[in-house]
Amino acid sequence: MSKPALLSLHQALRKGFQTLESNQKLWRSVLAECTPLMVSLGNLAEQLRALSRVQLSNTPLSAFPDLQQCLHFKLVQATDTVLGKLSEKMSSLQAARDAISNQVSGVFQVYEQNMDSLDLLTLTERSATAPSAADMMEWLQDAERHYRHQYLRRKTLLQTFRADDLSLLESAPKRWESLASPSAEDRITDTLFKVSLFMETQ
Amino acid sequence: WDEGNRKCSAVTGSARKVRDNAADWHNLMLRWDKLNDAGFAAAGRVVDLRLRQSHGEAPPPALSSAHADLQQECQELLDVLDKMAAVVMKMRRLAAWQSGLVDLERFQLGDEGRPVPLFHGWRTAQFEEASRQLLEAYGRELKLKRAVLQELAHTATSDLCMVYLSCWLHQPYTPPQARLRLEALLLETGHRPL
């Protein structure tokens, strides 16, 4: 009987789901922190746009000859600060993604080490308390892929932002929102529900 | 005087004065920041009311009440600006004290000034310079805010309103070094641990 092999696979799966659960929370909270930053990025772009459209020498502010330059500098500086904060957030997202990826590849390692003693029947067998090992491995892999994609797409978007590309910056909050994939997130939450009983049994 | 005990020398005479001035700079700049936030909120409401008026969103009977609102917000902004002017006034006094100190040392000790620094390494003139630069930045900022206040309620183009608001919020004449200069001042005078 392949009991010890299945047991160690189950153990690895439990750990994988635990990591997934805690990092899903982390991911969500980091994303929530990004939203106000994106909004201020959009605001700053709007201010820069307004400044570029106004000819200050034709306004009551003409008494301040270097104002245009000074204000522009300050706005760009503020934009840079926000972008810097966002890239810190990206590091947190990367850490969450890496934690999940590492744990999932650990599960597959355990599986490959015990492949000889795990036949198809053992892998696909499910009980009232536990889904089949094959299913659980697939769910983990799906979740891992989701975070990997999400990270890449967000990182790519962030890398295209530059302080002098106003139209892109103005649309930053919308673009950032559009990357969200609530259905995939829901699927992960569902998965965690499905394995909740399995995770409680040791 | 009291060279043997330089750490505690900051309790008498010129050193005491410089140290107190540094603390005052810190407090005044904090106060300025708070006033700036309050002023920005009021300025935002002024612009909001003004733009809504000029877009004719308010029905005629509501117009007079909107006018009163605008008046009230402008008054609030004016109050904030008066307080900011008072802050700059105090800053001016600090800078004057600081330059008086340089004069005093020149009188007492000749052109070479003090042989041993008051605190760690700054010459007395450097305190004066730091004060002067900070005062200059805040003085210009105040002038800009006065100009913004005068025009804010009479501007109907949204771009210019936006520029006024950015001027208020981002304080273009306060260079990023201002904050560093203050921190250097606080470090030198021992308010911040080295």
Image (tube, helix red, strand yellow):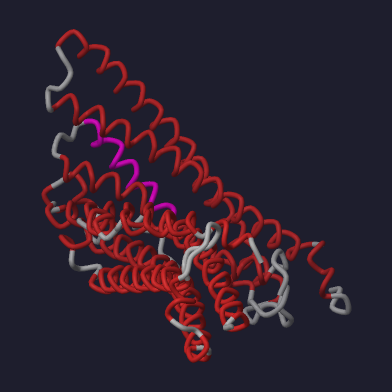
Q: Examine the image and state in which quarter residue B80 appears.
A: top left
- Tag count in the figure? 0
The x, y position of residue A12, in whole percent, is 56, 77
In magenta segment, residue B152: yes
The x, y position of residue A164, in whole percent, is 20, 68
Q: In the image, what residue occupies the spot 17% across and 55% down?
A: A49
The x, y position of residue A100, in whole percent, is 47, 73
Magenta span main SS: helix
Specify start and end residues of the magenta stretch as a single range: B137-153
Q: Examine the image and state in which quarter residue A148 appears.
A: bottom left
The one nearer the camera, B2 or A118, is A118
Residue at the top extreme, as displayed: B61
Residue at the front extreme, as displayed: A1
| A90 left or right of B157 in image | right
Q: In the image, what residue occupies the spot 34% across and 44% down?
A: B145
Residue B178 visible within the image: no
Above or below: residue B71 compared with residue A28: above
Q: In the image, what residue occupies the spot 24% across and 61% down?
A: A66
Above or below: residue B87 compared with residue B64: below
The x, y position of residue B136, in whole percent, is 43, 58
Quadrant of the frame with the N terminus of chain A: bottom right
Above or below: residue B48 compared with residue B172: above
Residue A198 visible within the image: yes
The one nearer the camera, A195 or B155, is A195
Q: In the image, what residue occupies the spot 53% across and 68% down?
A: B181
| A154 left or right of A200 in image | left
Quadrant of the frame with the C terminus of chain A: bottom right
| B115 left or right of A168 in image | right
In magenta segment, residue A176: no
The one nearer the camera, A5 or A66, is A5
